Structures are given as structure tokens and as C-alpha cells.
Image: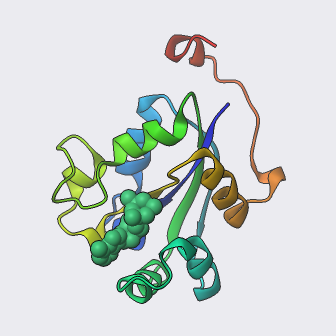
């Protein structure tokens, strides 16, 4: 089953939106298979955002993601990567549709509340930055047969 890495960023933790954000993804049907709170250090922030190295916003982005604790979660479900990003909304909250996390809680691109992996390959790599294989739990949820067919 597909897995994706979600981060609830420092702005959302500081604003008390952790529960609201997790709740939206959980209600969608995605299964939480790992969850932790941590403070991202500079090395991890740079690895997470390595693809953006050299862009003008890179150092501000690393400063921001390391500025306060985050929640890291692995969510599982059919097309989890795409579904989670759809629930998050466009990168810039000003462009994100109402009903999405960024569209309902954000205003500016630098304070966009959540991170979600953008491909299955990147999800695998990003999950490994935050979790060891043994931290990803495999379990059945009784309600899943009412959410998905297989
Ligand atoms: P994503 O988070 O929707 O995948 P990316 O393009 O991967 O968006 O960018 C990573 C993060 O970098 C964004 O979530 C946002 O916080 C920040 N970011 C992206 N583009 C800009 C920009 O033009 N200015 C400032 N920050 C940006
Ligand atoms: Mg991205």
C-alpha cells in the first residue's frame, strides 16, 4: 500500500493546528502508521529540501523548518501521495482552494503549514529521513473495509 510523509510545520504547531490538520487527513481515510514530534536540525532540514538548494528561498526555508518543533507522520492508503497533496492544497495558500488545509488555514507561501511528499519515490526517501523501518507499524483497521475495497 502506498505511503507518504507528512510534516506539520512549525507555524501549524505554534498555532495549535496539529489536531485539526491530522484530523482532516485521517477523516479522509488515510491510515496513520507512524507519528512523532521532533525539532528538525539544520542538516536534516537541508536534506529534506535538497532539491531546492540554490533557490532564493532555500536558506529561509531551512531556517523556518528548523525554527520550532514539527510533527512527522507516515500515512498509508491507496494513492496516498496524491490524495494527501490534494487535501493540503496548492503550495501557495493564496492559490489553494477553500476546503484544503492551506486554503483554509494559510495566507502566504512561506507559512503554508504542511509538507507532503510529491511522488512515491520521494516519499520513500523522505520517510527514511524521519523513521526507521521498525517505526512503521503494520496493523488492520476494522473500518477500512468501509473506506476502501482492497
Ligand atoms: P510543496 O511544499 O507544495 O511541495 P515545494 O515547491 O516543494 O512546495 O516547496 C517547498 C516549500 O518551500 C514550500 O512548501 C514552501 O514552504 C517553500 N516555498 C516554495 N516556493 C517558495 C517561494 O517562491 N518563496 C518562498 N518559499 C517557497
Ligand atoms: Mg515539495
Give residue 8's position: percent from left, percent from top.
45, 61
| Screen quadrant of the C terminus | top right
Q: In this view, does 63 lie to the left or right of 121?
A: left
Measured along the vertical axis of the image, is residue 44 above or below residue 63? above
Name the residue nearer the viewer: 103 or 69: 103
Q: Residue at x 35, y 41 (%)?
A: 87
Residue 71, percent across and down?
Answer: 52, 62
* Residue 64, above or below 135: below
**View extreme (front): residue:** 54
Q: Position of residue 115 (x, y in %)?
A: 45, 60
Residue nearer the viewer, 79 or 13: 79
Residue 91 appearing in the image: yes
User: On the picture, is 73 further left or further right than 58?
Assistant: right
How are the colours assigned in the image?
rainbow
Across the whole image, how many numbered discs are drawn on residues? 0
Residue 34 placement (x, y as % from top left): 66, 49
* Residue at image coords 56%, 27%: 78
The residue depicted at 53 percent of the width and 36 percent of the height is 80
Amino acid at each position: 500500500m502506498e505511503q507518504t510523509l507528512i510534516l506539520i510545520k512549525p507555524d501549524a504547531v505554534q498555532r495549535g493546528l496539529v489536531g485539526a490538520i491530522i484530523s482532516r487527513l485521517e477523516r479522509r481515510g488515510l491510515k496513520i502508521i507512524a507519528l512523532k514530534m521532533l525539532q528538525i536540525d539544520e542538516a536534516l532540514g537541508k536534506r529534506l529540501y535538497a532539491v531546492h538548494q540554490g533557490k532564493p528561498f532555500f536558506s529561509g526555508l531551512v531556517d523556518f523548518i528548523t525554527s520550532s518543533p514539527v510533527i512527522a507522520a507516515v500515512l498509508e492508503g491507496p494513492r496516498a501521495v496524491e490524495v494527501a497533496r490534494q487535501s493540503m492544497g496548492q503550495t501557495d495558500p493564496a492559490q489553494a482552494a477553500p476546503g484544503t488545509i492551506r486554503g483554509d488555514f494559510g495566507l502566504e507561501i512561506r507559512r503554508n503549514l504542511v509538507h507532503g511528499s510529491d511522488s512515491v519515490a520521494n516519499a520513500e526517501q523522505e520517510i527514511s529521513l524521519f523513521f526507521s523501518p521498525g517505526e512503521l507499524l503494520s496493523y488492520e483497521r476494522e473500518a477500512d473495509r468501509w473506506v476502501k475495497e482492497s
